[in-house]
Image (spheres, rainbow, N blue to C red):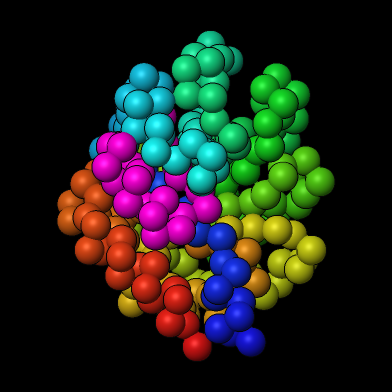
Amino acid sequence: MALAKSMTMLIKTCGLKTADMVSHSTMNGAHQIGFIFFEKSPRHVSPDEAAAAAVPARGKSEIVAVTVNASNEYLDEINTVLKPDMMQLHGSETPERVSEVKARYNLPVMKAFSIQDADDLEKVKPYIGIADRMLFDAKAPKGSELPGGNGVSFDWSLLESLDQSVEYMLSGGLNAQNVCEAINNTHAIGMDVSSGIEIKPGVKDKELMDGFFNAIKSCS
């Protein structure tokens, strides 16, 4: 059962910056490619840079625009230039804001949540039926200004208390060494990797990416 589950896992490679890495990710079978629009992140790209990098993914992988408490003006620019398939809101956006973004761009929205303890999962409830998908990431370490991409994970057993009807992807510290454990011990429909395929923050590595995808294919 675990093998069948892993074979159907949605895989999102996030924080890509170049067409070369996007092409390599798509060739590996990535279902989604995430572009980060957050200036404090080492993975930040401009809408023009993202649009150029996204070319190899068009028609092969979904393009996801990842933003953090972005203004309508910035979201308008991203959507006009990049033309993403999905929006990912990774800040403190309210359920009302999620609904507004969905309506404004007629796109599905994935809402990210930072998880450290059971109380953090309670914050998910108001978004059920509003966000099209949830993303559970680890809460940022003390001193970090990044809401995601910190290379740390959280206690996945916390997710056992979550309503199993909630569709979610898992993020936070995933890599080739622990992704099978994540698949086998959660009900996640997908895995979202960023720092786990990098040689340093913001710099993706083809061998690490290959290793991540190969690990998923070999899960048992």
Q: Residue at 44% x, 74% y: name it.
A: 216
Residue 48: image location, x then y, percent: 36, 19
Q: Is residue 24 magenta?
A: yes
Quarter placement of the N terminus: bottom right
Left or right: 181, with 19 as reference point: right
Does residue 206 show up magenta in the picture?
no
Q: Position of residue 151 (x, y in %)?
A: 33, 58
Query: In the image, what residue occupies the spot 72% across and 45% down?
Result: 132
Determine the image quadrant of residue 46.
Answer: top left
Looking at this view, is 3 or 161 the one in front? 3
Q: Residue at x 55, y 73 (%)?
A: 7
In the image, residue 2 above or below residue 28: below
Q: Is residue 38 visible?
A: no
Query: Which of the two residues, 103 or 41, is positioned nearer the viewer here?
Result: 103
Span colored in magenta: 16-38
Q: Report whether 117 appears left or right of 21.
A: right
**Residue 82 rendering spot, x and y as whole percentages:** 48, 24
Along the line of sight, which residue is nearer the eye, 94 or 142?
Answer: 94
